Image (spheres, rainbow, N blue to C red):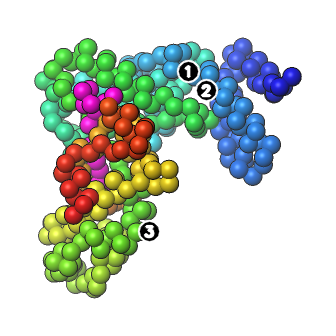
Amino acid sequence: AMRSTRLRILTQFNALPQGVKFLVDLRADLLRYATQDPALRSLDRELESRLGAWFDVGFLELQRITWNSPATLLEKLIEYEAVHEIRSWNDLKNRLDSDRRCYAFFHPRMPMEPLIFVEVALVDRLADNVQALLDEHAPVFDAQRATTAIFYSISNTQAGLRGVSFGNFLLKRVVDDLKRDYPRLVSFATLSPLPTFCRWAEKNPEAWRKAFTPADLERIGRHLPADTLPPASASDLQGVLADSRWSQDPRLTRALQHGLLRLAARYLMTTAKGGRPYDPVARFHLGNGARIERLNYLADTSARGQKQSYGLMVNYLYDPDTIESNVEAFSRSGEIAAAAAIRRSARD
């Protein structure tokens, strides 16, 4: 008597050939309107509950996607890529070459629909620039010599599965698969964006004043274009950075470097409501046991990279010896695992 009659109806869709996909798409539509209608919010909770049970990680299948995978699946990779746009078929082929790996989770009831996928580069050091990592004309690296696996893109594909988490299980399974195929791998890290860095910086003028000293401002002012006024305060640097020309001037980029790195370190160590990091990508990786290892300056010089993070990116490192303790400390008290250099920059 206490069970919603709607649940009985929703459960019957599981028996239909395209029933599960229909419900996932239905919830994606529902999420657009649920905030405006209490009745829809109730239905959303019931749908999320059903989907959470049906998409338990025990039911999911890990598959490697290669250039020989069906064309319809490759087209979906291009469509669903949410971090670094796949610009062409040549770009996709480069990401599936012998020194690259792509893995995805699939559900038996949605065999041609990747639920989440991760793109991996096999290299010999921590990557510090995404344009270099994705360069179609760069020579193919000998994967057997690789010591480091770089997870450079993780994309959820189904809006209707929001709130159903399986990204952490994907990374663990991929690490196990890579270690089996490449015993020389010793480091597993990401090259990750800082998607809300600029937004946070715009709202925190005090952080700019702490990151840029008067000496920094004087040095920056000497290298500005002739038509740009010198910054009267650190907050004025937002106007300087809004002009994309700054990243093309080697002297100006050097003058801005230390201050921007300090600002980004402070951002990564800042917590929002609930005591969790402000950055959503940081919340994901820290919650899975990684630590903030290194900030990379001008690591993404694309228009998107400039707009969301002034071109900065970050490496999160997954150290098998500390993953469990990091997860426990983060979940218990919100403790952020970070390299000493990151902590020092955030304090300076």
Label 3 or label 2, whichever comes before in sequence order: 2
| Real-space CA distance between mark 1 and mark 3, rounded to the nearest whole angstrom | 39 Å
Q: Please name the amino acid that badge 2 sits on.
A: Gly
Residue at the farthest front position: 333
Q: Position of residue 315 (x, y in %)?
A: 26, 43
Mark 3: which secondary structure?
Answer: helix
Mark 1: which secondary structure?
Answer: loop
Q: Please name the amino acid that badge 1 sits on.
A: Asp
Label 1 or label 3, whichever comes before in sequence order: 1
Q: Please name the amino acid that badge 3 sits on.
A: Lys
Which is more toward the observer, 155 or 318? 318
Which is more toward the observer, 191 or 275? 275
| Real-space CA distance between mark 2 and mark 1, rounded to the nearest whole angstrom | 6 Å
Mark 2: which secondary structure?
Answer: helix
Can the viewer see residue 195? no
Who's the residue at 72% across and 46% down the image?
34
Is 108 placed left or right of 249 in the picture? right
The picture quadrant where one finds residue 220 is bottom left
Can the viewer see residue 64? yes
Residue of label 2: 52
Residue of label 3: 203
Which is more toward the observer, 315 or 209? 209
* Callout 2 touching callout 1 (CB < 8 Å): yes
Residue of label 1: 56
* Callout 3 touching callout 2 (CB < 8 Å): no
Which is more toward the observer, 69 or 256? 256
Pointer 1 local density, CA inside 10 Å: few below 14, some 14–19, many at least 20: few
| Real-space CA distance between mark 3 and mark 2, rounded to the nearest whole angstrom | 36 Å
Residue range of the region highlighted in magenta in the rendering: 311-324
